[in-house]
Image (cartoon, rainbow, N blue to C red):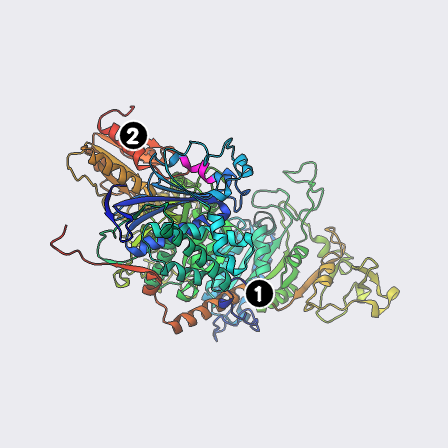
Amino acid sequence: MTGPHTSLATDLPTPGVGGLDLVPTTDDTQKAKDYTSDQEVRWCPGCGDYAVLASVRGFLPELGLKRENIVFVSGIGCSSRFPYYLDTYGMHSIHGRAPTIATGLAVTRPDLSVWVVTGDGDALSIGGNHLIHALRRNMNITILLFNNRIYGLTKGQYSPTSEVGKVTKSTPMGSVDAPFNPVSLALGAEATFVGRALDSDRKGLTEVLRQAAAHRGASLVEIFQDCPIFNDGSFDVLRKGDDVAERLIKLVDGEPILFGNDGEYGVVRSAAGGLEVAKVADVGEDAVVVHRAGEEDPTQSFALSRLSDQDLTHTVTGIFRKVDRPTYDDGARAQVEAATEQAEQRGDNLEALLRGKDTWAVMPEPENEQ
Amino acid sequence: MSTDTDVGPAGREVRQTHRVVIRFAGDSGDGMQLTGDRFTSEAAAFGNDLATLPNFPAEIRAPAGTLPGVSSFQLHFADYDILTPGDRPDVLVAMNPAALKANIADLPHGGMLIVNTDEFTKRNLAKVGYESNPLEDDSLEPYTTHKVAMATLTRGALEPTGMSKKDAERAKNMFALGLLSWMYHRGTDATEQFLREKFAKKPDLAEANILAFRAGWNYGETTESFAVTFEVAPARLAEGTYRQITGNLALAYGVVAAGLQAKLPVFLGTYPITPASDVLHELSKHKGMGVTTFQAEDEIAGIGAALGASFGGALGVTSTSGPGVALKSETIGLAVALELPLLILDVQRGGPSTGLPTKTEQADLLQAMYGRNGEAPVPIIAPQSPADCFDAALDAVRMALTYRTPVFLLSDGSIANGSEPWRVPDVDSLPDLSTAFATEANAPDGSGEFWPYLRDPDTLARPWAIPGTAGLEHRIGGLEKADGRGTISYDPDNHDRMVRLRQAKIDGIPVPDLTVHDPDGDAEVLVIGWGSSYGPIGAACRRVRAAGLSVAQAHLRHLNPMPRNLGDVLRSYRRVVVPEMNLGQLSMLLRAKFLVDAHSYTKVAGLPFQAEELAGVLTDAVKGDLPA
């Protein structure tokens, strides 16, 4: 935040304790029903969006915010219908652009809790640019990225998170696109909060949402979610079967990263400088790395996001990263406030602005002259 | 130059003249824009009426001394109200061979040429294809040529400063300014003060530039080569306090004023683009007056953030040029569907695609009018001169707020960078633009619900209910909405009704009737234009009338909706001529809407029309010589 106008430069405010500190609260008891709009929900039966909607409706009351100060902004796609089903303020905008709308809101209205609901196509394909810039600016918004690894609303084309080789309507011979890893991407885009949860894991999802909402700055929450029509069961290996415990790694801040039945496995440093999975019995408990979401250096969080490929062999959920950094909107407002104060002290006004420095007067012409 | 002659105190001839056109031309790095700006300020401070035309390449520094690198600044100043920066210069200042070659054809025979001889080296001459040195052959004979070794003289003047030769020579533009200032009897104090402020952090540079400026002035005073000096008396403009202003500055001030008059914070979401970036630069200085500026990651994000701010109750503004409008189109469509206020400033430039970034054109009219999917009407307002941008911005904001709609303001490169005197308005006389947010449920069925698309019966505008208002929680979006309730609706009849309602809302916006200027009262030919062609068209009309012919002039400020009386006006003339800097976009609209045989005259050269060429077209039209 330095520039040629150093005289105008203001000190950035230190981040507030929480993302919702400036949002008015209520003492009224709220229930999930209070957040339920009168609109009939029109997702396909079995869609993971239902579970997420239920979690969000169930979670919002615990924030204790005035309902009218919550805004959900979405783009285009199945998940982007989300705002219609919540009785808050909402905008269903255009494809990929929800972070831009949310940015204007967040900068001008510090009294709002601003949420973005987006999907893998919306956020990572058409809206990829806006996503990375919202993250690097650290806008005080919470982004819920519903990742079903398919285009649902346009009826089944592969998405930027689809696995290589995926056969879809638009890739009958298999996709040759290399996919994005949304958590890696967010970390690379200087995100200050990155979390991941599974749609069906209400407890885990709610915990990530709770911390994301409380975080001052941009929070990205990737939610694995099923599309029963075009990508059915794509996350089933994380839900059922004998080896779920060996696949799913739930991060707990400050704790060694253990998983599997009875903590059979742990995450350890690899010879190549990254992380890998080992049997604790083979390496010893001391070798297991401790998760530190608040670590300034994102290297370990990044390595965690890449423990396994998209085959979901080892899928990490929870909060990868949570660090404090000044937000764009707080900084922009601080400049406006500082400039306003200076302007008031100087007695600036519109008349003086319009006149500027160099004016000249034209006098009325004497009547006897032409 | 029409002149009266007088003899000055030093025995030197002083000619009184009514108007002068001066063109400073040099390399991009020669500081011609600064020189022209400063001379303009001197003319303004003296009380002349003026109009300017900066003309520069898109490249920041094209290869030195080449034709593509030539940058020029033309200034027309007069003792009466003038309309254009002038067709052709009376005085051409050429700082190098490239500037001479690129501009000499515009200098009428008998015009004054002042040349910096130092740059006329063999190498520089070869660069621009001069086979012989024009300063030594007879090619400049038709002109009153003054050969001045500006670099050498500047270097000499700066010798006491101990500056390197190269650095010293860079002040030669101030030498030229000093010489011209002397020739037109301008004071030196204001420019010296200006230079001290401009280089406040580098006092050495300030002093060097002042020395060069004084050297130029003294050169005129002491050498015998300039036998004549000129005086242009102050112009008799309407009473008031004046300042000089460019179109982009006036636009920015209009936005600041509109925010204050509406009692709303202004949020500018934008992305840098020539020739609109100065609006961002200016507004970013006025955070203390309720303006937040946001330089987004791209054009789309700029307007998206502005629309988000509007949703939150701010005055959302985005600024751009044609290529940016193309990128913003989908979001403009969303704003049409959301029915939220939004100001879109389009400073047009040469197109298509990247086109001519630094040149002017008015070819975005149909893009503004129709460049969206679906039926997506947007009001369009076009200022006619630099100073007019201020009023146009206020007008556009009033429309956006009253009718909850995006509004296009179509400026262009010549308005944006050109300048003229502006009678500073009395702040108390500015319109009150305040608007009310919805605060209460409005459902006509008494259900206590809030219907976001229940319209005001007069304006057809919907309520503006901003987040934070209890009880009015609602969802809006790009999907079609049920009339009134605003919930998603796929009902065929509802869609037909909503399409027509959105159109009717824009069509119903009252705009002032078109006024026609026909001083003779018997004109059979009407010339009608829009935007920045106002000046050249007006100047052309003056010429035609001075030749004893009658012509009527009208100028459209409101392009959507158009004035109610426009059809009647058009039909009341035998011939309608529509000059445009595009291939006939307005004339197509007029023909389609009013079934009139409008004659389109077009030129798309990246430069404003010349009064002389338009006068020819109008003369032909009056005499019935126009091709059918």
Name the residue: 30% across, 34% down.
Answer: B612
Provide the secondary structure element on which disc 2 rests.
strand
| The N terminus of chain B - image quarter | top left
Q: Amino acid at mark 1?
A: Gly
B186 in relation to A29, above or below:
above
The residue sitting at 51% across, 60% down in the picture is: B160
| Foreground residue among B100 and B579 | B100
Residue, far left: A368
> What residue is drawn where x is 41% and y is 47%?
B346
| Residue A256 falls inside the magenta stretch | no
Q: Residue at x 47, y 73 (%)?
A: A26
* Disc 2 target residue: B599
Give the numbered dot on residue B90: none
In this rendered view, identify the residue nearer to me: B405 or A240: B405
- Which stretch appears magenta? B99-104
Callout 1: SS: loop
Q: Is residue A132 left or right of residue B551?
A: right
Placement of B492 over or under A221, stated as above or below: above
Residue matched to label 1: A217
How many angstroms separate mark 2 from mark 1 (CA)? Answer: 59 Å
Q: Residue B168, can we see it?
A: yes
Percent x, y for residue B370? Answer: 40, 40
